[in-house]
Image: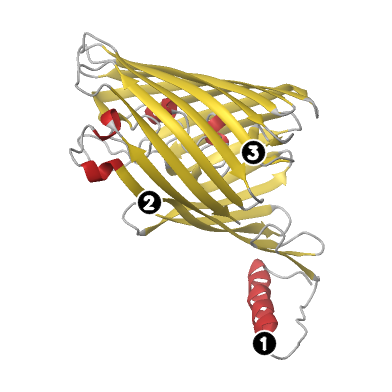
Protein backbone atom coordinates (compact mmCIF):
# COMPACT_ATOMS: atom_id res chain seq x y z
CA UNK A 1 0.00 0.00 0.00
CA UNK A 2 1.09 3.56 -0.57
CA UNK A 3 2.27 5.59 2.38
CA UNK A 4 1.12 9.08 3.35
CA UNK A 5 3.61 11.99 3.23
CA UNK A 6 4.15 11.84 6.98
CA UNK A 7 5.45 8.29 6.53
CA UNK A 8 8.21 9.62 4.32
CA UNK A 9 9.16 12.23 6.92
CA UNK A 10 9.18 9.66 9.73
CA UNK A 11 11.36 7.40 7.63
CA UNK A 12 13.86 10.23 7.28
CA UNK A 13 14.13 10.65 11.05
CA UNK A 14 14.46 6.92 11.58
CA UNK A 15 17.16 6.74 8.91
CA UNK A 16 19.13 9.49 10.59
CA UNK A 17 18.94 7.81 14.00
CA UNK A 18 20.00 4.51 12.50
CA UNK A 19 23.02 5.97 10.72
CA UNK A 20 24.18 7.72 13.91
CA UNK A 21 23.85 4.57 16.01
CA UNK A 22 26.90 2.60 17.06
CA UNK A 23 25.20 -0.58 15.89
CA UNK A 24 24.40 -1.29 12.28
CA UNK A 25 20.73 -1.72 11.42
CA UNK A 26 18.24 -1.88 8.63
CA UNK A 27 15.45 0.63 7.98
CA UNK A 28 12.31 -1.08 6.77
CA UNK A 29 9.22 0.52 5.26
CA UNK A 30 5.78 -0.72 4.48
CA UNK A 31 4.69 -0.42 0.85
CA UNK A 32 6.93 1.24 -1.73
CA UNK A 33 10.68 1.40 -1.20
CA UNK A 34 12.05 4.85 -0.29
CA UNK A 35 14.96 6.46 -2.14
CA UNK A 36 17.12 8.80 -0.02
CA UNK A 37 19.25 11.49 -1.70
CA UNK A 38 21.73 14.03 -0.33
CA UNK A 39 23.42 14.90 -3.65
CA UNK A 40 22.46 18.60 -3.51
CA UNK A 41 23.56 19.10 0.08
CA UNK A 42 20.08 18.78 1.59
CA UNK A 43 17.86 15.79 2.26
CA UNK A 44 15.36 14.42 -0.25
CA UNK A 45 13.25 11.29 -0.04
CA UNK A 46 10.79 9.77 -2.46
CA UNK A 47 8.97 6.53 -2.97
CA UNK A 48 10.24 4.39 -5.80
CA UNK A 49 7.09 5.01 -7.84
CA UNK A 50 7.48 8.80 -7.40
CA UNK A 51 4.00 9.26 -5.93
CA UNK A 52 5.29 10.68 -2.62
CA UNK A 53 8.31 12.81 -1.84
CA UNK A 54 9.74 15.01 0.91
CA UNK A 55 12.61 17.48 0.69
CA UNK A 56 14.40 19.78 3.14
CA UNK A 57 16.13 22.81 1.60
CA UNK A 58 17.41 26.19 2.70
CA UNK A 59 19.88 29.01 2.27
CA UNK A 60 22.11 31.31 4.26
CA UNK A 61 23.39 34.59 2.77
CA UNK A 62 25.84 36.74 4.70
CA UNK A 63 26.54 40.22 3.26
CA UNK A 64 29.02 42.96 4.08
CA UNK A 65 28.57 46.50 2.74
CA UNK A 66 30.74 49.61 2.64
CA UNK A 67 28.69 52.72 1.78
CA UNK A 68 29.37 56.41 1.20
CA UNK A 69 27.67 59.75 0.39
CA UNK A 70 24.17 59.23 -1.05
CA UNK A 71 23.94 55.75 0.47
CA UNK A 72 24.41 57.05 4.03
CA UNK A 73 23.05 60.58 3.61
CA UNK A 74 20.10 60.06 5.94
CA UNK A 75 21.90 58.34 8.80
CA UNK A 76 24.43 60.93 9.93
CA UNK A 77 26.38 58.05 11.45
CA UNK A 78 29.76 57.02 10.05
CA UNK A 79 29.35 53.60 11.65
CA UNK A 80 26.37 52.99 9.36
CA UNK A 81 28.72 53.19 6.37
CA UNK A 82 30.16 49.72 7.09
CA UNK A 83 28.07 46.79 8.20
CA UNK A 84 27.79 43.03 8.00
CA UNK A 85 24.41 41.34 8.19
CA UNK A 86 22.42 38.22 7.40
CA UNK A 87 20.60 39.01 4.15
CA UNK A 88 18.58 35.80 4.08
CA UNK A 89 18.29 32.76 6.32
CA UNK A 90 15.63 30.31 5.16
CA UNK A 91 14.57 26.72 5.58
CA UNK A 92 11.92 25.02 3.51
CA UNK A 93 10.01 21.76 3.26
CA UNK A 94 8.44 20.63 0.02
CA UNK A 95 7.27 17.54 -1.73
CA UNK A 96 4.56 15.58 -3.51
CA UNK A 97 1.63 13.48 -2.35
CA UNK A 98 -0.55 11.03 -4.26
CA UNK A 99 1.25 11.99 -7.51
CA UNK A 100 -1.02 14.99 -8.26
CA UNK A 101 -0.54 17.16 -5.15
CA UNK A 102 2.49 19.33 -4.34
CA UNK A 103 3.20 21.31 -1.19
CA UNK A 104 5.74 23.82 0.07
CA UNK A 105 6.38 25.47 3.44
CA UNK A 106 9.20 27.99 3.95
CA UNK A 107 10.31 29.92 7.04
CA UNK A 108 12.74 32.84 7.06
CA UNK A 109 14.29 35.34 9.45
CA UNK A 110 13.20 38.99 9.52
CA UNK A 111 15.44 42.02 10.06
CA UNK A 112 14.81 41.84 13.83
CA UNK A 113 15.93 38.17 13.84
CA UNK A 114 12.42 36.87 14.43
CA UNK A 115 11.06 34.08 12.22
CA UNK A 116 8.11 34.47 9.90
CA UNK A 117 6.13 32.33 7.50
CA UNK A 118 7.21 33.05 3.93
CA UNK A 119 5.67 30.36 1.71
CA UNK A 120 2.78 28.03 2.49
CA UNK A 121 1.10 26.63 -0.60
CA UNK A 122 -0.58 23.56 -2.05
CA UNK A 123 -0.72 22.85 -5.79
CA UNK A 124 -2.80 20.41 -7.80
CA UNK A 125 -1.22 19.17 -11.03
CA UNK A 126 -3.82 16.64 -12.08
CA UNK A 127 -5.24 18.90 -14.79
CA UNK A 128 -2.08 18.66 -16.91
CA UNK A 129 -0.71 20.86 -18.36
CA UNK A 130 -2.57 23.22 -15.99
CA UNK A 131 -1.44 23.66 -12.37
CA UNK A 132 -3.64 25.29 -9.71
CA UNK A 133 -2.00 26.75 -6.58
CA UNK A 134 -3.61 28.02 -3.39
CA UNK A 135 -1.93 29.58 -0.37
CA UNK A 136 0.81 32.14 0.21
CA UNK A 137 3.92 32.63 -1.94
CA UNK A 138 5.93 35.12 -3.97
CA UNK A 139 4.38 36.01 -7.30
CA UNK A 140 5.83 35.08 -10.68
CA UNK A 141 6.38 38.61 -11.98
CA UNK A 142 9.23 39.95 -14.07
CA UNK A 143 12.21 38.05 -15.44
CA UNK A 144 14.91 38.84 -12.87
CA UNK A 145 12.35 38.74 -10.06
CA UNK A 146 11.32 35.19 -11.02
CA UNK A 147 14.91 33.99 -10.67
CA UNK A 148 15.67 32.56 -7.23
CA UNK A 149 17.54 34.92 -4.91
CA UNK A 150 20.24 32.24 -4.83
CA UNK A 151 21.01 32.66 -8.53
CA UNK A 152 20.15 36.26 -9.47
CA UNK A 153 22.99 37.93 -11.30
CA UNK A 154 23.76 40.76 -8.86
CA UNK A 155 23.49 40.66 -5.09
CA UNK A 156 20.28 42.71 -5.34
CA UNK A 157 17.67 42.73 -8.08
CA UNK A 158 17.45 45.79 -10.39
CA UNK A 159 16.49 49.03 -8.63
CA UNK A 160 13.52 49.36 -11.01
CA UNK A 161 11.71 46.62 -9.07
CA UNK A 162 11.68 48.74 -5.90
CA UNK A 163 8.86 50.83 -7.37
CA UNK A 164 6.72 47.97 -8.66
CA UNK A 165 4.02 46.22 -6.68
CA UNK A 166 3.43 43.20 -8.87
CA UNK A 167 6.47 41.50 -7.32
CA UNK A 168 5.99 42.69 -3.75
CA UNK A 169 5.72 40.41 -0.76
CA UNK A 170 4.35 36.93 -0.38
CA UNK A 171 0.58 37.28 -0.42
CA UNK A 172 -2.30 34.84 -0.08
CA UNK A 173 -4.06 34.00 -3.29
CA UNK A 174 -4.91 31.53 -6.02
CA UNK A 175 -3.04 31.00 -9.26
CA UNK A 176 -3.56 29.06 -12.47
CA UNK A 177 -0.47 28.25 -14.53
CA UNK A 178 0.36 26.31 -17.65
CA UNK A 179 3.33 25.91 -19.92
CA UNK A 180 5.38 23.80 -22.29
CA UNK A 181 9.02 23.44 -23.25
CA UNK A 182 9.29 27.04 -24.50
CA UNK A 183 6.32 28.95 -23.09
CA UNK A 184 4.55 29.74 -19.80
CA UNK A 185 1.34 31.50 -18.79
CA UNK A 186 0.37 32.41 -15.23
CA UNK A 187 -2.71 34.21 -13.89
CA UNK A 188 -3.20 34.92 -10.19
CA UNK A 189 -5.57 36.72 -7.84
CA UNK A 190 -3.86 37.82 -4.63
CA UNK A 191 -4.84 39.56 -1.40
CA UNK A 192 -2.52 42.55 -0.95
CA UNK A 193 -3.29 43.10 2.71
CA UNK A 194 -4.25 46.77 2.39
CA UNK A 195 -7.22 48.00 4.39
CA UNK A 196 -9.97 50.38 3.34
CA UNK A 197 -9.39 53.94 4.46
CA UNK A 198 -12.65 54.21 6.44
CA UNK A 199 -12.55 50.61 7.69
CA UNK A 200 -8.95 49.83 8.67
CA UNK A 201 -9.99 46.56 10.27
CA UNK A 202 -11.32 45.22 6.95
CA UNK A 203 -8.72 44.02 4.49
CA UNK A 204 -10.30 43.31 1.12
CA UNK A 205 -8.01 44.62 -1.60
CA UNK A 206 -7.40 42.10 -4.39
CA UNK A 207 -4.83 42.30 -7.14
CA UNK A 208 -4.67 40.58 -10.51
CA UNK A 209 -1.35 39.41 -11.92
CA UNK A 210 -0.54 37.97 -15.34
CA UNK A 211 2.78 36.75 -16.74
CA UNK A 212 3.39 35.10 -20.09
CA UNK A 213 6.71 34.08 -21.63
CA UNK A 214 7.82 32.59 -24.94
CA UNK A 215 11.19 31.39 -26.18
CA UNK A 216 11.08 31.32 -30.02
CA UNK A 217 14.71 30.13 -30.13
CA UNK A 218 15.82 27.57 -27.58
CA UNK A 219 18.79 25.28 -28.18
CA UNK A 220 22.22 24.52 -26.71
CA UNK A 221 23.94 27.40 -28.48
CA UNK A 222 21.27 30.11 -28.50
CA UNK A 223 18.25 31.21 -26.49
CA UNK A 224 15.84 34.10 -27.07
CA UNK A 225 13.31 34.96 -24.33
CA UNK A 226 10.29 37.28 -24.54
CA UNK A 227 7.93 38.09 -21.68
CA UNK A 228 4.97 40.26 -20.68
CA UNK A 229 3.64 41.02 -17.18
CA UNK A 230 0.55 42.91 -16.07
CA UNK A 231 -0.62 43.91 -12.57
CA UNK A 232 -3.81 45.68 -11.50
CA UNK A 233 -5.21 46.67 -8.13
CA UNK A 234 -8.00 49.11 -7.23
CA UNK A 235 -7.99 49.93 -3.49
CA UNK A 236 -11.65 50.34 -2.50
CA UNK A 237 -11.20 53.24 -0.12
CA UNK A 238 -8.04 54.78 -1.49
CA UNK A 239 -4.68 54.40 0.20
CA UNK A 240 -1.35 56.19 0.43
CA UNK A 241 1.37 54.51 -1.63
CA UNK A 242 4.98 54.84 -0.53
CA UNK A 243 7.60 54.49 -3.25
CA UNK A 244 10.94 53.65 -1.71
CA UNK A 245 14.35 52.58 -3.01
CA UNK A 246 17.82 52.11 -1.55
CA UNK A 247 19.34 52.31 -5.06
CA UNK A 248 20.66 48.79 -5.40
CA UNK A 249 22.23 48.46 -1.93
CA UNK A 250 20.01 46.83 0.70
CA UNK A 251 21.44 48.79 3.65
CA UNK A 252 21.69 52.10 1.80
CA UNK A 253 19.66 55.17 2.76
CA UNK A 254 16.19 55.09 1.20
CA UNK A 255 14.84 57.65 -1.26
CA UNK A 256 11.11 57.93 -0.55
CA UNK A 257 8.13 59.41 -2.40
CA UNK A 258 4.51 59.24 -1.17
CA UNK A 259 1.49 59.25 -3.49
CA UNK A 260 -1.70 60.11 -1.56
CA UNK A 261 -5.12 58.48 -1.73
CA UNK A 262 -4.50 56.09 -4.64
CA UNK A 263 -7.61 54.25 -5.86
CA UNK A 264 -6.32 52.85 -9.17
CA UNK A 265 -2.95 51.15 -9.47
CA UNK A 266 -1.74 49.25 -12.53
CA UNK A 267 1.56 48.38 -14.16
CA UNK A 268 3.17 46.29 -16.88
CA UNK A 269 6.65 44.89 -17.49
CA UNK A 270 8.23 43.83 -20.78
CA UNK A 271 11.04 41.23 -20.78
CA UNK A 272 13.74 40.52 -23.34
CA UNK A 273 16.77 38.26 -22.97
CA UNK A 274 19.22 36.35 -25.11
CA UNK A 275 21.82 33.75 -24.23
CA UNK A 276 24.57 32.86 -26.68
CA UNK A 277 26.55 30.06 -25.07
CA UNK A 278 28.45 31.85 -22.24
CA UNK A 279 27.21 35.35 -23.08
CA UNK A 280 23.90 36.58 -21.68
CA UNK A 281 22.06 39.83 -22.49
CA UNK A 282 18.95 40.84 -20.57
CA UNK A 283 16.69 43.85 -20.11
CA UNK A 284 13.24 44.84 -18.85
CA UNK A 285 11.05 47.93 -19.16
CA UNK A 286 8.27 48.81 -16.70
CA UNK A 287 5.54 51.42 -16.25
CA UNK A 288 3.39 51.86 -13.14
CA UNK A 289 0.38 54.21 -13.29
CA UNK A 290 -1.28 55.42 -10.06
CA UNK A 291 -4.51 57.42 -10.05
CA UNK A 292 -5.28 59.46 -6.96
CA UNK A 293 -8.68 60.53 -5.60
CA UNK A 294 -7.01 63.87 -4.78
CA UNK A 295 -6.98 66.50 -7.53
CA UNK A 296 -3.71 66.80 -9.47
CA UNK A 297 -2.04 64.03 -7.47
CA UNK A 298 -1.65 61.24 -10.02
CA UNK A 299 1.78 59.67 -10.42
CA UNK A 300 3.58 57.49 -12.94
CA UNK A 301 6.76 55.47 -12.57
CA UNK A 302 8.76 54.31 -15.56
CA UNK A 303 11.99 52.38 -15.45
CA UNK A 304 14.28 49.99 -17.23
CA UNK A 305 17.52 48.11 -16.88
CA UNK A 306 19.98 46.38 -19.15
CA UNK A 307 22.61 43.87 -18.09
CA UNK A 308 25.30 41.77 -19.74
CA UNK A 309 27.19 38.83 -18.29
CA UNK A 310 29.83 36.36 -19.38
CA UNK A 311 30.89 33.03 -17.89
CA UNK A 312 34.69 33.09 -18.13
CA UNK A 313 35.23 29.33 -18.15
CA UNK A 314 32.60 28.18 -20.62
CA UNK A 315 29.52 27.75 -18.48
CA UNK A 316 26.03 29.14 -18.93
CA UNK A 317 22.87 29.62 -16.92
CA UNK A 318 20.13 27.03 -17.03
CA UNK A 319 16.72 28.07 -18.37
CA UNK A 320 13.41 26.49 -17.42
CA UNK A 321 9.78 27.62 -17.24
CA UNK A 322 10.50 31.18 -18.30
CA UNK A 323 13.34 31.86 -15.84
CA UNK A 324 17.12 31.56 -15.67
CA UNK A 325 18.64 29.46 -12.92
CA UNK A 326 21.88 28.11 -11.56
CA UNK A 327 24.95 28.33 -13.84
CA UNK A 328 26.37 25.01 -15.03
CA UNK A 329 29.72 24.13 -16.52
CA UNK A 330 31.56 27.17 -15.16
CA UNK A 331 32.59 28.89 -11.95
CA UNK A 332 33.39 32.53 -12.77
CA UNK A 333 30.91 35.12 -14.04
CA UNK A 334 31.41 38.85 -14.65
CA UNK A 335 28.57 41.27 -15.37
CA UNK A 336 27.52 44.89 -15.71
CA UNK A 337 24.08 46.47 -15.23
CA UNK A 338 22.59 49.92 -15.76
CA UNK A 339 19.21 50.85 -14.25
CA UNK A 340 17.12 54.01 -14.43
CA UNK A 341 13.77 54.94 -12.87
CA UNK A 342 11.71 58.13 -13.23
CA UNK A 343 8.86 59.21 -10.93
CA UNK A 344 6.49 61.75 -12.48
CA UNK A 345 4.05 63.32 -9.97
CA UNK A 346 1.41 65.81 -11.10
CA UNK A 347 1.76 67.59 -7.77
CA UNK A 348 5.53 68.14 -8.22
CA UNK A 349 7.04 70.29 -10.94
CA UNK A 350 10.20 68.25 -11.53
CA UNK A 351 10.43 64.52 -12.16
CA UNK A 352 12.58 62.47 -9.78
CA UNK A 353 15.26 60.51 -11.63
CA UNK A 354 17.32 57.74 -10.05
CA UNK A 355 20.18 55.91 -11.75
CA UNK A 356 22.41 53.03 -10.72
CA UNK A 357 25.34 51.26 -12.33
CA UNK A 358 26.43 47.87 -10.98
CA UNK A 359 29.62 45.96 -11.79
CA UNK A 360 30.16 42.54 -10.33
CA UNK A 361 31.86 39.18 -10.25
CA UNK A 362 30.41 35.85 -9.06
CA UNK A 363 32.35 32.75 -8.04
CA UNK A 364 30.39 29.51 -7.89
CA UNK A 365 32.80 27.37 -5.90
CA UNK A 366 30.45 24.37 -5.73
CA UNK A 367 26.77 23.74 -6.41
CA UNK A 368 26.12 24.97 -2.84
CA UNK A 369 28.64 27.77 -2.27
CA UNK A 370 28.68 31.14 -4.02
CA UNK A 371 30.79 34.25 -3.39
CA UNK A 372 29.91 37.62 -4.95
CA UNK A 373 31.40 41.10 -5.06
CA UNK A 374 29.43 44.11 -6.41
CA UNK A 375 30.32 47.75 -6.93
CA UNK A 376 27.21 49.94 -7.10
CA UNK A 377 27.13 53.62 -8.02
CA UNK A 378 23.92 55.58 -7.55
CA UNK A 379 22.78 59.06 -8.54
CA UNK A 380 19.67 61.22 -8.05
CA UNK A 381 18.64 64.57 -9.53
CA UNK A 382 17.35 65.78 -6.15
CA UNK A 383 18.72 69.10 -4.95
CA UNK A 384 20.68 67.65 -2.02
CA UNK A 385 24.30 67.85 -0.91
CA UNK A 386 25.11 64.20 -1.61
CA UNK A 387 23.29 63.51 -4.86
CA UNK A 388 25.49 60.54 -5.75
CA UNK A 389 27.34 57.81 -3.93
CA UNK A 390 28.75 54.32 -4.13
CA UNK A 391 28.55 51.00 -2.34
CA UNK A 392 30.76 47.92 -2.28
CA UNK A 393 28.83 44.83 -1.27
CA UNK A 394 30.10 41.27 -0.86
CA UNK A 395 28.22 38.05 -0.20
CA UNK A 396 28.99 34.52 0.91
CA UNK A 397 26.14 32.08 0.29
CA UNK A 398 25.40 28.47 1.14
CA UNK A 399 22.31 26.77 -0.30
CA UNK A 400 21.06 23.23 0.05
Find residue 99 and report its horizontal and vertical position in percent. Answer: 74, 56
**Dot placed on the residue nearer the N-terminal end, 2 or 3:** 2
- Badge 2 is on which residue? 85
Q: Callout 3: helix, strand or loop?
A: strand
User: Left or right of 70: which side holds 59?
Assistant: right
Q: Callout 2: helix, strand or loop?
A: strand
Q: Residue at x 30, y 16 (%)?
A: 299
**Mark 2: few, some, or many residues within 10 Å (few <14, many ≥20)?**
few
Quadrant of residue 339 within the rendered picture: top left
Q: As displayed, is residue 175 above or below residue 259? A: below
Q: As displayed, is residue 338 above or below residue 332? A: above
Callouts 2 and 3 close, C-beta under 8 Å? no
Q: Which mark is residue 332?
A: 3
Label count reads: 3
**Dot placed on the residue nearer the N-terminal end, 3 or 1:** 1
* Mark pair 2, 3: CA separation: 24 Å
User: Left or right of 140: which side holds 37?
Assistant: right
Q: Residue at x 50, y 28 (%)?
A: 359
Find residue 371 and report its horizontal and vertical position in percent. Answer: 55, 46
**Mark 3: few, some, or many residues within 10 Å (few <14, many ≥20)?**
some
- Badge 1 is on which residue? 21
Give the foreground label among 3 and 1: 3
* Mark pair 1, 2: CA separation: 38 Å
Viewer-proximal residue, 155 or 78? 78
Quadrant of residue 271 within the rendered picture: top right
Q: As displayed, is residue 347 above or below residue 323? A: above
Find residue 72 and report its horizontal and vertical position in percent. Answer: 26, 35
Amino acid sequence: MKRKPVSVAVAAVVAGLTLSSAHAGVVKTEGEDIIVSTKNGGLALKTEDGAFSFKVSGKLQWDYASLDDLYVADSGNDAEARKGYIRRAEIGFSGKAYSDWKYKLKLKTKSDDSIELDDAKISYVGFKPVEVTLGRWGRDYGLENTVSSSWIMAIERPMMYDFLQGDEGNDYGIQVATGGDNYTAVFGIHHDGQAEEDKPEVERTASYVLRATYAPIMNDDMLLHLGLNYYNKNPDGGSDVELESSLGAKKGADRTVTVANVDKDSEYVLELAGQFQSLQLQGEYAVRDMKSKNANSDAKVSGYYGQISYMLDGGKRTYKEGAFGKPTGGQWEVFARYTQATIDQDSVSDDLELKTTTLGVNYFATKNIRASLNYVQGKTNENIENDKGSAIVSRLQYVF
